Amino acid sequence: MTKLIKFAFVAMVLMMVMSPSMAFAEGDGTIGKMGAGLGAGLAAIGAGIGIGRLAGAAAEAIARQPSAASSITAAVNLPLFLLEGVAIIGLVVCILVVIM
C-alpha cells in the first residue's frame, strides 16, 4: 500500500511541476486546462482533508471534555472558515486560468 501512495505522490508532483511549463506551450491550451483542473481537484481534496481532520480532532476533544464544548467549537470556527476560504480561492484561480 505504501508503494502505491509513494507512486501516486510522485506522479502528482511531476504533474504539478510539468503543468505550468506545458500551459504556455503552443496549441489550443488543452494541457493548461488540464493543469487547472488538476489544481482545482487538489485544492478541493486538500481542503476536504484539512476540514475532516479539524472536525475529527474537535469531536474527539468534545468527547473527552464535554464541559468545554462551547470553547472548543468557538476555537474551531476560525480555522474552519479559513480553510474554506483557501479552497474557494484555489478554485476561483483555476477557473480564471481556464477562462483566460
Image (spheres, grey):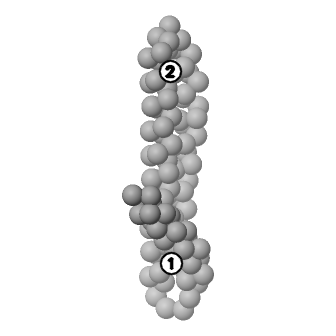
Give percent across and percent down for residue 90: 54, 57
For the residues labelled 1 and 2, the Cα–Cα distance comes to 43 Å
According to the picture, the residue beneath numbered tag 1 turns out to be 32
Name, please, the residue furthest toward the left: 1
Give percent across and percent down for residue 81: 54, 37
At 44% from the left and 63% from the top, the residue drawn is: 3
Q: Which of the pair 7/17 is nearer the observer?
A: 7
According to the picture, the residue beneath numbered tag 2 turns out to be 61
Three-letter code for the amino acid on which mark 2 is drawn: Ala
Q: Which of the pair 5/45 is nearer the observer?
A: 5
Residue 37 visible in image: yes
Please determine whether, in this image, residue 60 is positioned above or below residue 7: above
Neighbourhood count class around disc 2 (C-alpha, 10 Å): few under 14, some 14–19, many 20 upward: some
Give percent across and percent down for residue 74: 56, 21
Which element carries disc 1, helix, strand or loop? helix
Give the number of the disc on residue 41.
Answer: none
Q: Which of the pair 74/61 is nearer the observer?
A: 61
At 56% from the left and 48% from the top, the residue drawn is: 86
Which dot, 1 or 2, sits closer to the camera? 2
Three-letter code for the amino acid on which mark 1 is drawn: Gly
Which element carries disc 2, helix, strand or loop? helix
Of pointers 1 and 2, the one earlier in the residue sequence:
1
